[in-house]
Amino acid sequence: MPEYTLFCPSLDTTPRVARDFVASVLRSQQLGDLVDDAALCTSELVTNACVHAKGADAVLRLAVGEPLAAVRVTVYDGDLQPPVLREGCHGESGRGIWLVDALTAGRWGTEPDAAHSVGPPPRGKGVWFELGAPGLSGFCREGAEG
């Protein structure tokens, strides 16, 4: 399965760059029907990494399942605290994981104390989501919670 990696510095523009990256990859893989939901979920996870990892850079990994029309996005950051799923919308903030949960039908989770072998951060967590065909045998769930 093809995998793509994007380094995500803790900048205000990073969520938009990550959204565009994921959308571009999915369109090139003929997965245009997943673009809107994947871009929004990516934006939420990258925004959380930029806000909660206290200035540490993050790494985004995008895997496209073959031959299934599916995608898995994982955002690794240096914060060890898992995200919190709040019920419903709460004003201007705090609804990101709720949106991810709703758009993915609960197909998201965390990789606690995750080490990413490519670039920073060396230790932290990974937060992932999946869209597309369910039951993706090609995506590793070892050690994942959700």
Image: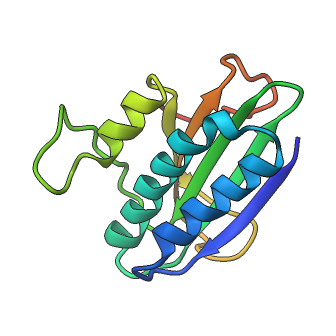
**Residue at (64% x, 54% y) in the render:** 23
Q: In this view, does 40 lie above or below 129?
A: below
- Quadrant containing the N terminus is top right
Q: In which quarter of the image is residue 19?
A: bottom right
Residue 31 x/y as whole percent = 74, 38
Residue 122 x/y as whole percent = 62, 72
7 with respect to 57 (left or right): right
Q: Which colour scheme is used?
A: rainbow
Total number of numbered labels?
0
Q: Which residue lies furthest to the top in this view?
A: 135
**Residue at (69% x, 40% y) in the render:** 32
Q: Is residue 53 above or below residue 69?
A: below
Residue 91 x/y as whole percent = 10, 51
Residue 12 x/y as whole percent = 39, 80
Q: Is residue 134 above or below residue 94?
A: above
**Residue at (77% x, 28% y) in the render:** 69
Front residue of this view, candidates 73 and 16: 16
**Residue at (45% x, 22% y) in the render:** 105
Q: In which quarter of the image is residue 8?
A: bottom right
Front residue of this view, candidates 46 and 40: 40
